[in-house]
Image (cartoon, grey):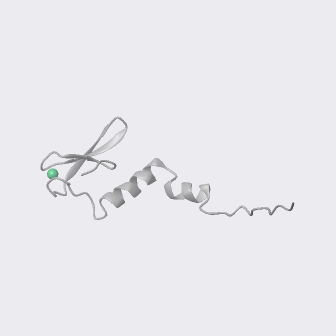
């Protein structure tokens, strides 16, 4: 019984993936750009001014107008 060898196809390689999201900073930037393509906008009041701080190793973005806190991964 003959068996066909399956050719191993190269898709998105690990190297490509790491080149895109290699560092944590790049990953954050990609998340930030997908969340706020035109820059930060407060999900609560729409103000564009924000300050940044860290909590638990995660960056938080706090609206300066209403003090709403958002993360890159949180919902609205
Ligand atoms: Zn706000």
Q: In this view, does 12 lie to the left or right of 25?
A: right
State which quadrant residue 58 falls in.
top left
Q: Which residue is drawn at 29% across and 60% down?
A: 36
Q: Residue at x 32, y 58 (%)?
A: 35
Furthest toward the top, the residue is: 56
Q: Is residue 2 left or right of residue 56?
A: right
Rendered location of residue 74, percent (x, y): 30, 47
Q: Is residue 21 left or right of residue 5?
A: left
Q: Is residue 21 left or right of residue 67?
A: right
- Indicate the quadrant containing the N terminus: top left, top right, bottom left or bottom right: bottom right
Count of numbered circles on the image:
0
Furthest toward the right, the residue is: 1
Rendered location of residue 66, percent (x, y): 12, 48
**Relative to the observer, which residue lies in front, 29 or 9?**
9
Rendered location of residue 30, percent (x, y): 40, 57
State which quadrant residue 42 falls in.
bottom left
């Amino acid at each position: 019984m003959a068996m066909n060898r399956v050719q191993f196809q190269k898709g998105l390689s690990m190297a490509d993936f790491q080149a895109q999201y290699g560092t944590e900073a790049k990953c954050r930037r990609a998340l930030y750009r997908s969340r706020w393509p035109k820059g930060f906008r407060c999900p609560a009041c729409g103000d564009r001014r924000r300050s940044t701080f860290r909590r638990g190793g995660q960056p938080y973005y706090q609206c300066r107008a209403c003090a709403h806190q958002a993360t890159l991964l949180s919902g609205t």
